[in-house]
Every structure is written in C-alpha cells, then in structure tokens.
Image (spheres, helix red, strand yellow):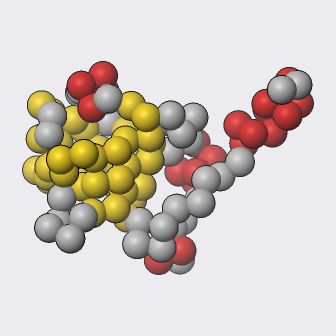
Amino acid sequence: MGMAAWASAQTNVRPFPPTAERGVMQVIAPPVIAMSGKPDRLSPGARIRGPNNLLLMSGAIIGQNLVVNFVRNPTGEVHDVWVLTDAEAALKLPTQQ
C-alpha cells in the first residue's frame, strides 16, 4: 500500500452500530473496568479494538483512560469496544446529535 493510501486509510472514521454509546474506559483488573468513572464489567469474550481497528488485550491497557464507543450485551455488560482516534472522538454519535 502506498503512503498516500495508508495516510488516507488512517483518517477514515469507522462505522459504529446505532446502539453505540460513548465513554471513557479504564481497565482496572480484567474484566473489571470503570466506564466514565462508574464501576462496570467486560463481558466474557468482549472485543476491544484499538484506533487501528486491531484487537487489544484488556490486560495491555490497564490504567489507561481511553475515549471509546461501546455496545453492551443483553445482560448489560460491555461487549464491543472501539478505542477512538482523535477524529472519531471529535464527532458526535448519531444518538447524541
């Protein structure tokens, strides 16, 4: 992939599900997290995608405050998480407009 195509790919905003919420996630001790300062929990099999859309292991980001979009499973646990780029964080979610 050429540099121009790579740079262009890095500025794209990923599509998020309409049910996505926004928060600041901090992994305390997997699966225990804080979401916007409130105690919360990752579901079994939770997927965390980094700004490059690659999967992150929750243990690798312990203690970091990350701006994220996330979706909960039917039992209320955080199941899908996307760590946002600066461009994505600057945009409002469709449900927040």
Expressed as whole percent of the image width and height from the top left, the position of residue 79 reads 28, 54
In this rendering, position of residue 52 left or right of residue 36: right
Residue at position x 32%, y 29% from top?
A: 57
Residue 7 in sight here: yes
Image coords of residue 90 (percent x, y): 58, 53
The residue positioned 32% from the left and 36% from the top of the image is 65
Q: Residue furthest front?
A: 45
* Residue 8 position by quadrant: top right
Q: Position of residue 4 (x, y in %)?
A: 88, 30
Q: Residue at x 25, y 38 (%)?
A: 26
Residue at 27% of width from left, 63% of height from top?
72
Q: Position of residue 92 (x, y in %)?
A: 54, 65
Using the image, determine if residue 74 lies above or below residue 10.
Answer: below
- Indicate the quadrant containing the N terminus: top left, top right, bottom left or bottom right: top right
Mark count: 0
The answer to whether residue 67 is seen in the rendering is no
- Residue 21 located left or right of residue 90: left
Residue in front for this viewpoint, 55 or 29: 55
Horizontal placement of 49 versus 64: left or right? Answer: right
